[in-house]
């Protein structure tokens, strides 16, 4: 096997590579690593990226795998490796400062934050957003919104939404749709459910799938318009019609718009002989006599009104005399004229001869009673307007075959079968159901306006057909809807079938639409839904069920803007260092701990003493974390969390440690000088350029403005603000806090211009990110470093002559055996190499058993450069690079001020 050895946890290049035959345990022993029985191992082993515990090293023999051995600093445990894998950028030490999110290193990923979300969305197979602190949350849909009509004038929308993982406290008055509290809306209700609670008590949990093909259209209608085009002849049959008895046979079949109950009219010819009769009287007059069958008019009686078409326009005649027998009649007619003196009747006279003439009753029509193949059987009706009754006296049509046009076939009412809308599959692929719903909507109401202005009822019949997808058998449901209203109305109908199946539906209108402006009967297919299996509880999630009364009470654009002001419930850090039971909290420390625990680790991997110290600072200053986290990494989430409290994340001694900069009065990190560096300490000053940023603009979400995105400019006195650096601060919802953080950044631009780089042997590993350290480089007329070669009482002897400056106060400091700094203390000159230390502090103890103490000397003001550690990077197994920046208390001058 090939074994690669790395100097630390994050190096990309191995310091050594070995070829080995045998077990991993034997390799360790051959290298002098005594791993048996040790509580803490100096080495962590990985085979193809998977850590192998020491107990398995003797059983690990691999030939084609990548084996990595990494040196483990003290306190580094398996959690550390997991954190590196999850939150560290490859090849970048966790000891490097994580900048405030938004300062050129906003963590990348899909929808890092959803704090700005202003609408409810469905996040199928996506990350469930998680809330920290108190925030305005637009919950995500767990079930699609279901809209239905409880009665013709009342529509409801109901849905179940996820507030987030974990527990939340929600004030009922904060549950809103748009900016309106649901508690103030008539007909609105909501129910909050804790994680794992039973959510089916109110029925709003049901998972209704809505077919996307049915509903609003690009033409602006609320649903699919159900038309009845046949009124204009658009769906009449083509070809010829053969009439026989009470049957009409269409040569090319009947269109889908004509079916049972459709009312038809025809105007059929028969052959007649017309002769002229002379009427003897006071004055001789003439009258035409028609001899023929008059089949369609039988039984024919005197006084009957008939329509006649003899090559021109139809005229209305009145039967004057009837002679002969059925099938061979002799009939004369009169015309009727309305004059100023009343009605006058005149004998009807026309051209003699034998020819085809059409006769029919103007108040007769035919209703289809059956269609078999191409043959339609009809029943004669007699009446007018909307009142038509069967006419049992009618015997038959004239026998013959004529074109559709010549027979003047027309649809005049009854059940007019409009074009089918659909079929549309109501159920998604792979699902089956027994319960379906469809909605009908009448956008102009249903009514007829009478001549006197009164509203009269208008009825519309609709036919629904459904079948299992792939089946050829349709099941029909016809229903008539009647009302006398100009208001919009709607109906929701439920269809239940035995056994689960995936079904398709189609719908059509079977009542002719009236073209006149006094009739309102437009109907639209508004919705089609399927009830799918619905969970009755959601483990680990807080949910809210909502039912809202619609149709005029709220705008459609607000229906997906249900929001709540939720506060996360977590254990909080107590004064004694323990954690409380979950309670509503905005504490930074609580969510920091929650993130760590949520990835499977314990408080043992957190620097609890430092977290407690910062917790006390955060709570005293009112610094909180309020945010909604979406898809992100553990490290990014921790950085956002700590940035809200002006802190950064680092890893120190194997523990996740929050670090917050601030005013320092005492050094807390190791000193560096020529005595423990392998090359000169380099100092680099960055001058300001004309195109540098001269201020900062911070973007945050303001809780006082309904969590709307806001910006605040942060500038030092004298800054024109011509070029502002943009910073985003998720988690900060206060203008004052955003300004203070921005002012820190703005002051850094001005007062943090020095950078320091130094190289050491392993001494550099003592330093931690954020340490306040003294740097003593070899700079003329500045502090100096030496070795303590002797201690006598309060006197210290230096290995180098000490440079005293007349009239100046001098100090001395030294390095302790653990690498920390002792001092500085006031110093008095004894001679060039000897000084006396003021005070009672313990003196250094030179010994041959360890490296002698390092000594640092200079004037009170200039004995060392104060600096902040920003990075510690192992370069190889015996070399460490440390990077620092200058410390300047002016950076923190606005930490307690208020924005202008």
Image: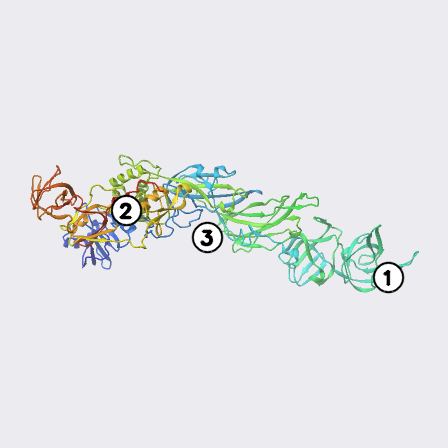
Give the distance between the C-alpha atoms of the residues marked 1 and 2, in whole angstroms: 117 Å
Residue 497 rendering spot, x and y as whole percentages: 53, 47
Observer-side mark, 1 or 2, equals 2
In the depicted view, which residue is nearer to us: 226 or 690? 690
Residue 454 rendering spot, x and y as whole percentages: 68, 43
From the viewer's perspective, is residue 535 above or below residue 429? above
For residue 434, side relative to residue 482 (left or right):
left
Residue 276 shows which numbered tag? Answer: 1
Give the distance between the C-alpha atoms of the residues marked 3 and 1, in whole angstroms: 79 Å
Residue 25 can be seen in this image: no
**Residue neighbourhood size for the residue with mark 2, other residues' Cα within 10 Å, grouped as few (<14), some (14–19), many (≥20):** many
Observer-side mark, 3 or 1, equals 1
For residue 880, side relative to residue 628 (left or right):
left
The residue indicated by pointer 3 is 430
At mark 3, the secondary structure is loop
Residue occupying the far top of the picture: 576
Residue occupying the far right of the picture: 282
Which residue occupies 45% across, 37% down? Answer: 173
At mark 2, the secondary structure is strand
In the depicted view, which residue is nearer to us: 706 or 829? 829
In the depicted view, which residue is nearer to us: 639 or 431? 639
Residue 528 can be seen in this image: yes
The residue indicated by pointer 2 is 649
At mark 1, the secondary structure is strand
For residue 760, side relative to residue 691 (left or right):
left
């Amino acid at each position: 096997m090939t074994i690669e050895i790395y100097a630390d946890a994050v190096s990309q290049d191995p310091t050594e590579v070995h070829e080995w035959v045998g077990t991993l345990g034997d390799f360790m022993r051959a290298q002098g690593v005594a791993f048996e029985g040790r509580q803490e191992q100096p080495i962590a082993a990985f085979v193809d990226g998977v850590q192998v515990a020491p107990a398995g090293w003797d059983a690990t023999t691999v030939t084609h795998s990548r084996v990595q051995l990494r040196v483990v600093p003290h306190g580094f445990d398996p959690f550390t490796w997991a954190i590196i894998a999850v939150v560290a950028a490859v090849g970048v030490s966790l000891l490097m400062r994580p900048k405030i999110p938004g300062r050129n290193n906003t963590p990348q990923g899909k929808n890092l934050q959803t704090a700005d979300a202003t609408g409810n969305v469905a996040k199928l197979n996506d990350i469930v957003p998680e809330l920290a602190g108190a925030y305005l949350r637009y919950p995500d849909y767990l079930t699609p919104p279901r809209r239905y009509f409880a009665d013709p004038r009342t529509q409801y929308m109901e849905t179940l939404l996820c507030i987030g993982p974990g527990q939340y406290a929600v004030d009922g008055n904060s549950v809103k749709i748009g900016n309106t509290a649901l508690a103030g809306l008539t007909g609105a209700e909501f129910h909050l459910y804790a994680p794992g609670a039973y959510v089916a008590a109110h029925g709003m949990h049901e998972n209704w799938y809505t077919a996307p093909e049915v509903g609003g259209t690009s033409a602006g209608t609320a649903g699919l318009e159900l038309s009845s085009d046949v009124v204009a002849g658009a769906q009449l049959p083509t070809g010829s019609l053969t009439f026989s008895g009470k049957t009409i046979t269409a040569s090319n079949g009947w269109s889908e718009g004509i079916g049972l109950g459709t009312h038809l009219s025809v105007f059929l010819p028969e052959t007649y002989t017309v002769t002229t009769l002379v009427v003897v009287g006071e004055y001789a007059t003439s009258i035409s006599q028609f001899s023929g069958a008059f089949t369609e008019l039988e039984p024919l009686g005197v006084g009957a009104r008939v329509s006649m078409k003899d090559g021109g326009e139809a005229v209305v005649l009145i039967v004057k005399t009837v002679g002969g027998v059925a099938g061979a009649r002799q009939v004369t007619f009169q015309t009727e004229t309305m004059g100023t003196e009343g009605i006058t009747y005149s004998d009807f006279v026309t051209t003699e001869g034998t020819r085809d003439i059409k006769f029919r009753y103007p108040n007769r029509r035919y209703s289809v009673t059956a269609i078999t193949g191409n043959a339609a059987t009809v029943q004669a009706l007699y009446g007018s307007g909307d009142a038509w009754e069967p006419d049992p006296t009618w015997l038959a049509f004239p026998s013959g075959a004529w074109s559709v046009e010549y027979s003047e076939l027309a649809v005049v009412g009854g059940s007019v079968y409009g074009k089918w809308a659909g079929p549309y599959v109501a159920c998604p692929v792979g699902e089956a159901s027994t319960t379906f719903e469809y909605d009908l909507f009448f956008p102009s109401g249903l009514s007829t306006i009478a001549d006197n202005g009164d509203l009269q009822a208008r009825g519309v019949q609709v036919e629904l057909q459904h079948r299992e997808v792939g089946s050829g058998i349709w099941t029909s449901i016809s229903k008539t809807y009647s009302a006398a209203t100009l208001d919009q109305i709607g109906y929701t109908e439920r269809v239940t079938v035995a056994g689960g199946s995936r079904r398709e539906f189609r719908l059509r209108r079977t009542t002719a639409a009236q073209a006149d402006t006094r009739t309102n009967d437009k109907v639209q297919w508004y919705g089609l839904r399927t009830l799918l299996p619905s969970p009755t509880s959601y483990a680990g999630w807080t949910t809210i069920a909502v039912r809202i009364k619609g149709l005029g009470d709220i705008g459609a654009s607000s229906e997906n803007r249900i929001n709540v002001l939720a506060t996360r419930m977590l254990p909080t850090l107590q004064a004694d260092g323990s954690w409380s039971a979950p309670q509503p909290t905005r504490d930074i420390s609580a969510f920091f701990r929650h993130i760590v625990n949520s990835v499977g680790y314990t408080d043992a991997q957190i620097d609890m003493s430092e977290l407690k110290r910062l917790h006390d600072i955060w709570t005293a200053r009112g610094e909180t974390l309020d945010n909604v986290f979406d898809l992100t990494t553990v490290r990014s989430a921790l950085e956002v969390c700590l940035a809200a409290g002006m802190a950064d994340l680092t890893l120190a001694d194997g523990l996740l440690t929050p670090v917050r900069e601030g005013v320092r009065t005492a050094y807390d990190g190791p000193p560096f000088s020529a005595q423990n560096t392998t090359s000169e300490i380099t100092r680099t000053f960055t001058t300001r350029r004309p195109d540098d940023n001269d201020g900062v603009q911070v973007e945050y979400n303001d809780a006082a403005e309904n969590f709307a995105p806001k910006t605040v400019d942060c500038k030092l006195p004298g800054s024109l603000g011509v070029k502002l650096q943009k910073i985003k601060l998720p988690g900060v919802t206060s203008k004052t806090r955003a300004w203070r953080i921005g002012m820190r950044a703005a002051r850094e631009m001005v007062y943090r211009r020095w950078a320091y780089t130094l190289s050491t042997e392993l001494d550099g590993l003592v330093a931690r990110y954020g340490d306040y350290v003294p740097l003593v480089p070899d700079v003329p007329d500045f502090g100096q470093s030496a070795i303590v070669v002797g201690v006598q009482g309060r006197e210290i002897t230096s290995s180098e002559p000490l440079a005293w400056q007349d009239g100046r106060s001098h100090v001395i400091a030294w390095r302790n055996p653990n690498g920390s700094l002792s001092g500085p203390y006031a110093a008095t000159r004894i001679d060039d190499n000897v000084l006396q230390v003021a005070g009672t502090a313990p003196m250094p103890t030179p010994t041959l058993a360890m490296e002698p103490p390092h000594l640092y000397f200079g004037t009170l003001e200039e004995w060392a450069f104060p600096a902040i550690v920003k990075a510690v990077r192992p370069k190889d197994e015996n070399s460490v690079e440390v990077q620092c920046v200058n410390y300047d208390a002016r950076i923190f001058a606005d930490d307690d001020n208020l924005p202008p």
